[in-house]
Image: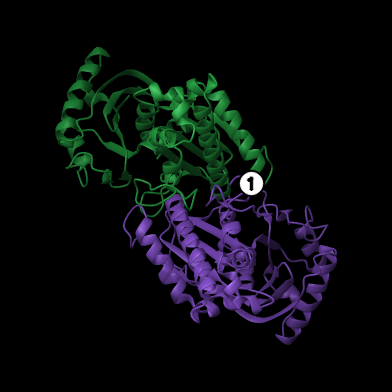
Chain colours: A purple, B green
Amino acid sequence: MIAAIDLGGTRTKFGLVDHGKVMASLTCPANAQGSLEGHLDEVLEHLRALCVEQRTTLESCEGIGVLCTGLVDNRAMKVLSTNGKYDDAVGFDFCKWARARTGLSLRMDNDARGALLCEWCYGAGQGVDDLMMVTFGTGIGTAVVLDGKLVTGSHFSGGILGGHILVHSEGRQCTCGAVGCLESEASGWVLPELIRSHALYSESSLRELDAIGFEELLTHAATGDACASAVQEHCYRIWGEALVSFIHLYDPQRIVIGGGLMNSPEPVLASFRETVAKFIWGDPGQVEIVAAQHPNRAGLIGAAALFYAH
Amino acid sequence: MIAAIDLGGTRTKFGLVDHGKVMASLTCPANAQGSLEGHLDEVLEHLRALCVEQRTTLESCEGIGVLCTGLVDNRAMKVLSTNGKYDDAVGFDFCKWARARTGLSLRMDNDARGALLCEWCYGAGQGVDDLMMVTFGTGIGTAVVLDGKLVTGSHFSGGILGGHILVHSEGRQCTCGAVGCLESEASGWVLPELIRSHALYSESSLRELDAIGFEELLTHAATGDACASAVQEHCYRIWGEALVSFIHLYDPQRIVIGGGLMNSPEPVLASFRETVAKFIWGDPGQVEIVAAQHPNRAGLIGAAALFYAH
């Protein structure tokens, strides 16, 4: 059994995972404005309570697996950058903390790599040595396995910055400082702006909504709203073309697609397969494009998988 | 000593290479409209003559190393696609040919991977486990080493299709069938079109030229020609932004830049370093960007290096 912690942007998920099975799990607010150490201590108390429910103890677990956003040194088990979350996170000694509190060893990595590990070990990526995972959500997360090894690179950013490849050299300003990134052209966070700046927005039923996510976009597109349809088509096209770039750079055997879109995966998968078949350099059918099997538990299963796949 | 053959688009280079040193070399027309077997037989006769000059024999070489454009199965040593060169190339049994003619073993790979091998083993890429090479010429060639291993991927295209990543989703038609590829936005083959379609072309001194390559572009830009300067700036910007995409995807420690531009490398390297520092996610100085050390002999040295680095 592994004690798994997935430090998200607004919520932290934690639980007990046994060989790819989540035995018990809970969530709590991330409190990312406060101290990481205090937050981890709080999570640990919750985990101890879960252990009691499972008739075990935290100390009898094999270890603690942690995922978080940002850059993670997955050898020294330290956070290198967090985009402003937890002012004590960078340089925090996770292993020392785990040893002092529990006597357990700890492993950690970036959350996109964790999601890939989950699918690689227990989901839609099983049996493949060259694998990519792309998660479409508020941002766009990517991670890659090549030749049976997780791509890490020289500064721990290898494979995980796929949301920040150039896709439109005259495009929109991205939060990362560059222009025309995949994320700034088509992602959850830019979606409201894409919609409101569209020529057909003034006639769109989307105007009545306070918050617009992909679910609302697809629902309104399905009812024939022209603005919603056009923005959906724009996103599908950019994402499909970005997949072609990824394929041309990594040459994977399979790409696993994750994120909220995968609640009804077939239309978007069909669109991706069509774009890839049209633009790929090589056999149009050479890359399998499939939906993630664990979209909602990837964080916990992936955090635990750090003990099996690293 | 290795007998090295670099099958180019218009010319074939061949020679004798001893641990990274070209002992003797020649070129001949590629005859890419004819038969590959006939061409290789012809090259072999030239190589035998070079051996006589070097007071050795072809049979006493350690092997034959071959590079060519297109997709190459570097395990079975076969060409998978050639873009129309040599109608008997795809499926040709190079090893059988080498054994029958010389008794020697043969290794082969794509020419961009060969150029990287050359620099990795004997040039500007030495001592680095995460390395990328980008060659700017008529097309744009790329190759990658991650974690001390040449990236090959699942279909032998891993790392070598960097010229065909999307950089402008509303851009120009590329020869590969896609739109807005790095090559179709800024490369040797699209340069004449970039210049002639520029608003300032009608007043440009470039109008007097029959053929325009990067050398002419840079010369005219240096004399203050506004059209040449604008197109140069466009190419430098797109290339620098594409380097940022490559860095975000592979996270190399060093990028080696090759190609004709490297005759006077400092201005373009300075431009690349500036763009990367501006847009990189991470430490602006974390990636070394350096010029290739063997721009003119990379093919032969790289073909021979196949016997040491694979």
Residue B52 in sight = yes
Establish if A65 lies above or below B102: below
Which residue is located at x 29 percent, y 32 percent? B8
Residue B294 visible? The answer is no
Q: Which chain carries label 1?
A: A
- Residue named by callout 1: A155
**Residue drawn at point x = 65 percent, y = 79 percent:** A208
Image coordinates of residue B77 in percent, x first then y, are 28, 43
User: Is B21 above or below relative to B306?
Assistant: above
**What quarter of the picture does the N terminus of chain A occupy?**
bottom right
Residue type (three-letter) at the residue carrying disc 1: His
Q: Which residue is drawn at 56% across and 59% down?
A: A142
Asked if B290 appears above or below A85 in the picture, the reply is above
Q: How many labels does the image show?
A: 1
- Closer to the camera in the image, B76 or B81: B81
Between B226 and A132, the one lying in front of the other is B226
Q: Of helix, strand and loop, which one carries label 1?
A: loop
Asked where in the image residue A63 lies, by quadrant, the reply is: bottom right
In the image, B51: left or right of B128? left
Q: In this view, does A166 lie above or below B208?
A: below
The residue that appears at 20% across and 26% down in the rendered structure is B43
Q: Quadrant of the C terminus of chain A?
A: bottom right
* Residue A55, x across and y down, in percent: 72, 86
Q: How crowded is mark 1: few (under 14 residues within 10 Å), some or many (20 or more)?
A: some
Percent across and percent down for residue B219 are: 48, 20
Image coordinates for residue A151, horizontal then vertical, percent = 54, 53
Say left or right for A298 vs A272: right
Q: Going by the image, does A207 lie left or right of B36? A: right
